[in-house]
Amino acid sequence: AAAPRLAGSVDTPGNALDVAVSGDFAYVADLLSGLQVVEVSNPAAPAIVANLAFQFGASRVAVEDTLAYVAASGGVLEIVGVSSPTAPSRLGSVDTGAGIRELAAAGTLAFVCDIADNLVVVDASDPRAPRVVSTTALGALGLGVTAAGDRVLVGEGNGRVQIFDVSNPASPQ
């Protein structure tokens, strides 16, 4: 098989820690430079088309439909409207209780692995007033999280993958 070929790149003003893609746009958690929105429709010439600053930066990002979920410092999850990617707007935020290590989203739910070894479920069905609906102890360091339908999978530092049924987000099983 052929080796991957670099198609293009763009320098961000900060440290690009995480990237989520939706359509022709990449959303970059750029640490102290906040959220950078990069148009990637032409991979040979990606361009930053918008940014949104957060007081303490951005470390993780997930995008679902017209919402971006951005992990800010201290466990704050910012909800950002991206229906117009070139004009992202801060809609609301919620304190998840501890620093956010990993983040995934499905629909209007965000799933956070925090530094206190918890899986935190945030309901952003009202993006101006997101709320924590459950916190479940993982028992180990959550190093990766992904959402697939009514399931959330968490990769842990102890070599285990936990699968949660989140059909009732207030009570993951």
Image: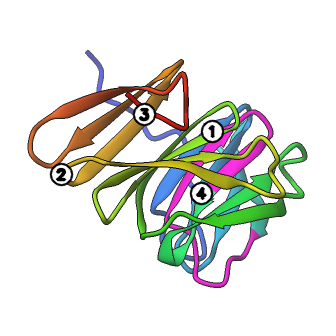
Q: Is residue 98 magenta?
A: no
Q: Which mark is residue 109?
A: 1
For residue 159, above or below residue 75:
above
Secondary structure of the residue carrying numbered label 2: loop
Total numbered labels placed on residues in the image:
4
Where is mark 2, residue-wise?
A: 140
Secondary structure of the residue carrying numbered label 1: strand
Q: CA distance from mark 3 to mark 1?
A: 12 Å
**Of labels 4 and 3, the one closer to you:** 3
Marks 3 and 1, the one that precedes in the sequence: 1
Neighbour tally class for label 2: few under 14, some 14-19, many 20 plus, Cα within 10 Å: some
| Viewer-side residue, 132 vs 43 | 132
The three-letter amino acid code for the residue at tag 3 is Thr
Marks 1 and 4, the one that precedes in the sequence: 4
**Of labels 4 and 2, the one closer to you:** 2
Viewer can see residue 19? yes
Marks 4 and 2, the one that precedes in the sequence: 4
On the image, the x and y values in percent for residue 99 come to 42, 70
Secondary structure of the residue carrying numbered label 4: strand
Where is mark 3, residue-wise?
A: 146
Q: CA distance from mark 3 to mark 2?
A: 16 Å
Answer left or right for 134 relative to 145. Answer: right
Q: Who's the residue at 9% across and 45% down the image?
A: 158
The three-letter amino acid code for the residue at tag 4 is Val
The three-letter amino acid code for the residue at tag 2 is Ala
Q: CA distance from mark 1 to mark 2?
A: 22 Å
Q: Is residue 66 magenta?
A: yes
Q: Which residues are magenta?
A: 52-69
Marks 1 and 2, the one that precedes in the sequence: 1
**Of labels 1 and 4, the one closer to you:** 1
